[in-house]
Image (spheres, grey):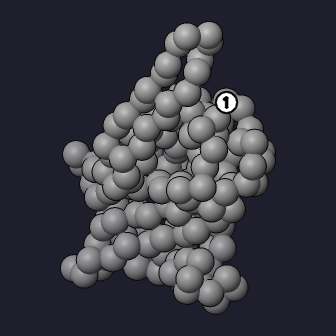
Amino acid sequence: MADQIYYHIKASGTGTSVSFFNTNEGASGEVVTNLPATNMVNKNFTVRKLVVQPSSDLTRADLLKLVEGAVVKLTINKDEVIKMPLVAALGDMRFSTEGTVASNEIMSVGQETKGYEFSTPVMIPANTSFEVKIVLEAALGASTDMICMLYGDEK
């Protein structure tokens, strides 16, 4: 077994969903992804951790949409393996928002996150379609880069 981290950097756009791993290294380059084939790995891959990291240029309003109104799903061969609030998968960051909610009210939200670690690792079989998808309750106000990382090992 060899440690492996598959990643995909993608602009979120301003829609209500963001799909990851729908490209490959040959088409998009190693800075964007290291996936050998679109939506597939070429060896059995055991996922131990899922991390989504938004760019630090997020506006306060868009950060709140990710923290309070978004889910992330891992689908393998069209079967939904896990669905969770996106905040559970946000990675290696400390974020806070402060601002006036209404007159004389201040809101502060803070949390340190490190991604989602599976208590039971999930296997993505070689040459089997998979996807990580974020679904938002409301569209982001501006497109921002996001990176999705799957930590694990392959055989």
**Residue in front for this viewpoint, 105 or 7:** 105
The image shows a total of numbered marks equal to 1
Whole-percent x, y for residue 35 in the image: 53, 78
Location of the C terminus (image quadrant) = bottom left
- Location of residue 5 by image quarter: bottom left
- Residue at position x 49%, y 34% in the image: 97
**Residue in front for this viewpoint, 2 or 56:** 56
In this view, 141 is above or below 107: below
In this view, 132 is above or below 111: below
For label 1, count other residues whose C-alpha is less than 10 Å away and answer few (under 14), some (14-19) or many (20+): some
- Residue at position x 29%, y 58% in the image: 48
Q: Is residue 17 left or right of residue 89?
A: right
Whole-percent x, y for residue 8 in the image: 55, 69
- Residue at position x 44%, y 26% in the image: 108
**Residue in front for this viewpoint, 39 or 65:** 65
Residue 119 appears anywhere in the view: yes
In this view, 72 is above or below 2: above
Q: Which residue is mark 1?
A: 137
Q: Is residue 110 left or right of residue 26?
A: left
Location of the N terminus (image quadrant) = bottom left
**Residue in front for this viewpoint, 39 or 96:** 96
Whole-percent x, y for residue 57 in the image: 60, 55
In this view, 45 is above or below 83: below
- Residue at position x 64%, y 35% in the image: 61
Please state which amino acid type lies under the numbered disc 1. Answer: Glu
Q: Is residue 65 left or right of residue 117?
A: right
Tell me the element at label 1: loop
Whole-percent x, y for residue 42 in the image: 47, 80
Residue 127 appears anywhere in the view: no
The extreme front residue here reads: 104
